[in-house]
Image (cartoon, coloured by chain):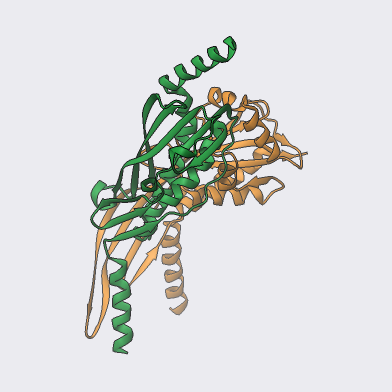
Chain colours: A green, B orange
């Protein structure tokens, strides 16, 4: 009997623990989009593929696999041909753009910090965008945000996982919505059109 | 004497239970009295607004309204299935807030093709939340070696306000609006054991909104 009571207590106390370790391996839906006739190479560095965010000492969020799934879907909606490469020597001669994504920071806010009944996650991305010859076009800062509907009866791990998945979906939405609105990309695109017309 | 006591107790229970019913008001706006027609292949999708910072229309409520509308002949596509199928154009960041933006979205061939493939004719936006507006009373509970119990009385008011907007994805016009306000007070009586007398405010709002929305549509 004492053992059962002890076990129940441990289970309850484990539920109250303030640490959370989350791994995101969600498969994201394919994007609905009309891609532009551009060949892009996405350079996935090892640090990006295995990225684990540590917003505080008690929380770890492994978003490496999840964000690659997401970017594969999102970039295929932006460009006609997309190659995911792990080093620059894999770039094909037809490539027009080289994009290197990286995570700048992951932040988490819990109900005890924000005094709201929600968990929030911010992921700050940077996309280093270069032309095929290596000329820098721009560095695009891309923030993404996700929050849980509420925190009622949700464990900290589940809530952070849910908010992170929403933040990753938001990153895909931001990319699709704003990529071709980046002034430097717009300029680069118009120069490509001029080049193609003059050929 | 026994019958009189029984009547008194019954009356007391009725008074308490009547105190637990919600008051619900529905406002409806439609440009015409005609029902909104859809053929047997066409579907409706009900989506919750999630772009506001301080609240979001909860999925449970959307599912509840969806079930009410589906109980007729109208086919309702589950919310998440539609959002995933048309990703990323109905995420909180990208979802159209007005008809001009919807028109621009539907000009994209891939989006229009997806909506057509899903046979979605009408889109219903639900926007609102249920909030606790006032609380009163106090209750204290204690437990000891000889047993435990609660003593006191607590009450709280809940208010559900939801607005539904119906968009026609074929003609790209608004077909009507509905607004439901439902309010009620719940009680918790502590007489050794806590006795909850809950008013189903959100459920009432869902039933009223769902049934009214169902009456909007007519399957040809």
Using the image, determine if residue B75 lies above or below residue A91: below
Location of residue B21 in the rendering, given as x and y in whole percent from the top left corner: 46, 54
Residue displayed at 52% across by 42% down: A72
Quarter of the figure with the C terminus of chain A: top right
Residue furthest bottom as drawn: A1
Q: Looking at the image, how many numbered discs can be counted on the residues?
A: 0
Front residue of this view, candidates A21 and A190: A190
Using the image, determine if residue A125 lies above or below residue A154: above
Left or right: residue A193 compared with residue A156: right
Query: Is residue A105 among the parts visible in the rendering?
Result: yes
Front residue of this view, candidates A164 and A97: A97
Using the image, determine if residue B198 lies above or below residue A93: below
Residue displayed at 45% across by 16% down: A187
Location of residue B212 in the rendering, given as x and y in whole percent from the top left corner: 60, 42
Which quadrant of the view contains residue A131? Answer: top left
Residue furthest front as drawn: A89
Quarter of the figure with the N terminus of chain A: bottom left
Residue furthest top as drawn: A198
Front residue of this view, candidates A73 and B34: A73
Location of residue B174 in the rendering, given as x and y in whole percent from the top left corner: 60, 27
Front residue of this view, candidates A80 and A91: A91
Query: Is residue B88 among the parts visible in the rendering?
Result: no
Location of residue A96 in the rendering, given as x and y in whole percent from the top left corner: 51, 27
């Amino acid at each position: 009997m004492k053992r059962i009571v002890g076990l129940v207590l441990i289970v309850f106390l484990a539920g109250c623990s303030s640490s959370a370790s989350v791994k995101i391996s969600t498969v994201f839906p394919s994007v609905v989009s009309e891609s532009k006739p551009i060949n892009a190479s996405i350079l996935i560095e090892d640090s990006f593929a295995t990225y684990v965010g540590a917003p505080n000492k008690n929380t770890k969020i492994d978003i490496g696999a999840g964000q690659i799934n997401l970017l594969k879907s999102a970039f295929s909606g932006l460009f006609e041909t997309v190659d995911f490469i792990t080093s620059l020597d894999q770039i094909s001669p037809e490539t027009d753009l080289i994009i290197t994504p990286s995570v700048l920071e992951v932040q988490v806010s819990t109900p005890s910090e924000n005094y709201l009944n929600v968990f929030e996650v911010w992921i700050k991305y940077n996309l280093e965008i270069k032309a095929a010859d290596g000329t820098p076009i721009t560095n695009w800062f891309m923030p993404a945000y996700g929050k849980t509907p509420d925190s009622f009866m949700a464990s900290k791990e589940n809530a952070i996982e849910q908010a992170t998945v929403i933040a990753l979906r938001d990153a895909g939405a931001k990319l699709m919505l704003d990529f071709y609105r980046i002034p430097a990309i717009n300029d680069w695109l118009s120069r490509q059109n001029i080049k193609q017309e003059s050929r | 004497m026994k019958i009189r006591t029984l009547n008194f107790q019954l009356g007391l229970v009725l008074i308490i239970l009547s105190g637990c019913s919600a008051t619900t008001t529905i406002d409806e706006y439609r440009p015409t009295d005609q029902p909104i027609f859809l053929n047997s292949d066409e579907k409706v999708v009900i989506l919750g607004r999630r772009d506001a910072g301080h609240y979001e229309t909860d999925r449970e409520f959307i599912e509840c309204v969806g079930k009410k509308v589906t109980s007729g002949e109208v086919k309702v596509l589950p919310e998440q299935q539609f959002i995933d199928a048309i990703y990323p154009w109905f995420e909180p960041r990208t979802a159209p807030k007005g008809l001009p933006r919807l028109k621009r979205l539907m000009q994209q061939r891939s989006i229009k093709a997806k909506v057509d493939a899903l046979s979605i004719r009408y889109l219903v936006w639900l926007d609102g939340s249920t909030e606790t507006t006032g609380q009163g009373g106090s209750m204290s509970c204690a437990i000891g070696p000889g047993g435990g119990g609660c003593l006191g009385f607590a009450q709280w008011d809940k208010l559900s306000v939801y607005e539904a907007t119906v968009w026609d994805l074929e003609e790209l016009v608004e077909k009507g609006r509905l607004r439901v306000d439902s309010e009620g007070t719940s009680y918790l009586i502590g007489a050794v054991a806590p006795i909850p007398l809950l008013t189903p405010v959100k459920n009432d709002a869902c039933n009223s909104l769902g049934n009214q929305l169902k009456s909007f549509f007519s399957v040809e």
